[in-house]
Image (tube, rainbow, N blue to C red):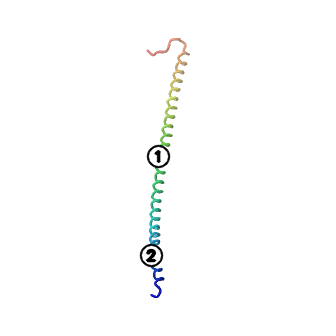
Amino acid sequence: MKNPRIFIALIASALLFSPAAAIQAQSAGQDLKTAGTDTKDAAKSTGKAVNKGTKKAYHGTKKATVKGYDKTKEGTTKAYDKTKSGTKHLLHKDSGSSASSEPNHPQ
């Protein structure tokens, strides 16, 4: 070689830039790994959110169903009591209109 300085410069530049290429390759691989991890975490987060929403909807539906059942039961009991009271009132009203003041008892 006529000029050893050019040869040394070429070798030095090759050694200098080859680790940079390796670092970039590692960086690209790490970027892919990070992207995969982020995707996995996003899927987990979505799954947890869906689970939470489903449980919330279930409990809301259950609460509304129990409340409706209780209100229906309460209304039915109230209607029963009013019917019972009205029937007694009519029976006492009818027995009071008879000619005798004594109640009609079958013998």
For the residues labelled 2 and 1, say whether their Cβ atoms are less than 8 Å apart: no
Q: Residue at x 47, y 46 (%)?
A: 55
Q: Is residue 45 above or below residue 18?
A: above
Q: Residue furthest bottom?
A: 2
- Left or right of residue 12: residue 93: right
Can you tell which of label 2 and label 1 is closer to the viewer? Answer: 2
Q: Residue furthest top?
A: 101
Q: Which residue is mark 1?
A: 55
Q: Residue at x 50, y 25 (%)?
A: 84
Q: Residue at x 46, y 67 (%)?
A: 27
* Residue 19 badge: none
Number of callouts in the render?
Answer: 2
Decide which of tag 2 and tag 1 comes sooner along the chain: 2
Disc 1 is placed on an element classified as: helix
Q: Which residue is mark 2?
A: 15
- Rounded to the nearest angstrom, the CA distance separating label 2 from label 1 is 60 Å
Kind of residue at disc 2: Leu
Q: Quadrant of residue 86?
A: top right
Horizontal and vertical percent position of residue 26: 44, 68
Horizontal and vertical percent position of residue 7: 46, 82
Kind of residue at disc 1: Lys
Disc 2 is placed on an element classified as: helix
